[in-house]
Image (cartoon, grey):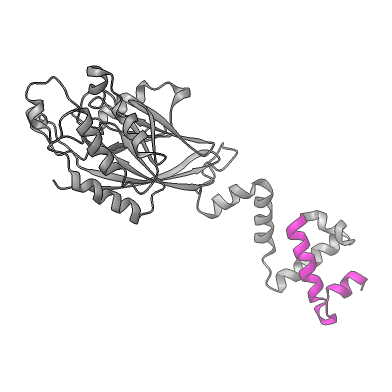
Amino acid sequence: MDKADIEGDTSHGGEDRIYEVVAQYLIHGDDAADILGIKPQTMRRYLRRGKALGLDVERGKLLSDIEANYSRSELLAIAKGARILPGQPAVPVVNFDGERTRIGIMGDIHFGSKDCLYPLVNEAFKEFEKKKVDIVCQVGDLTEGMSNRPGHIYELSHLGYHEQKKVAIKYMKRCPAPLYMIDGNHDRWFIKSNGALIVPDICDAIGDNATFLGHDEGNLALGDSATVRLWHGEDGSSYAVSYRIQKIVESLTGGTKPNVMFLGHVHKCTYLYDRHIHCYSAGAFQRQTAWMRGKRLSSHTGFWIVDIYVNDNGVSKTTGTWYPFYA
């Protein structure tokens, strides 16, 4: 009996040696013989003895071979249930984790309108504080404005630029998180009539907690790899709630697409994923007006809280909760 046989004989205390050889084989494959300084046929005897001890050598070697062919992130994805697809060199889904940003979304508020749900603005702020949102986004038509439409003046609770600005500041300064806003077509009636920039002026009055992002649209960066776009528009409602969003997304140039869009103007609530953009239509804080009833337009009153997860590849996932107001 040669030295290897003596070492491999469990009656001579060689069981530890068997485990050592099998372990090296699972790590290094056939190269384990050279690493251990034994002959290949001697290593095979150790492996046979390992099987006799109940070690699943073949299964262990198979797992070792798989490990050699995939990166750590791919192996983690496989462990979570991702499939290896024929013809694809890598696991298609690797990582859904990422840094979370929680955002409160406020649609058309229309401060100055008799149909504005003033108390529910405070209720939204309470929920934003309770859920610890990181930022709040308001997607235009913060104020009702002053149009030349016949009878509009009788629909106002606050008349003119000064009064609508004052009531908007009164409520929006209570926002519990940094506030980002764009203006909408109702806000811009003040621009058209006398050049007054009511939403930028409101942001200036609130101070550092409020930022004006732009007229009708504005962008926010989440980390280095994701963009959120606030959008208002001057188009109209569509018969299908999703159709308007689809046409907006369809119009975007490929290289300028955001990862997430929050959309206002039509007072509708919905979520749509199209062209790799997570789209949230923001609803409203204004109940259906007489003008809307005449046009057979509904108003979805409420607000969103949306969690956006961003990793090195962009937005890995979003989750949204809609809070309806039954008004």
* Residue at x-position 17% and y-position 35%: 112
Q: Main secondary structure of the magenta part?
A: helix
Image quadrant holding the N terminus, namely bottom right
Measuring 11% from the left and 30% from the top, which residue is drawn there?
292
Q: Is residue 252 magenta?
A: no
Percent x, y of residue 255: 48, 23
- State which region is magenta: 1-28
Q: Quadrant of residue 287?
A: top left
Nearest the viewer among 164 and 177 is 164
Task: List the single residue furthest toward the right.
Answer: 2
Q: Is residue 112 left or right of residue 251?
A: left
Q: Which residue lies most toward the bottom here?
A: 11
Image position of 220 (left or right of 235): right
Residue 83 x/y as whole percent: 51, 47
Q: Nearer the viewer, residue 164 or 234?
A: 164
Q: 23 above or below 289? A: below
Q: Give the percent coordinates (x, y) of residue 298.
A: 14, 35
Compared to residue 119, the image places residue 254 above or below, namely above
Q: Residue at x 26, y 23 (%)?
A: 188
Q: Nearer the viewer, residue 163 or 220?
A: 163
Q: Which residue occupies the foreground of this view, 246 or 49? A: 246
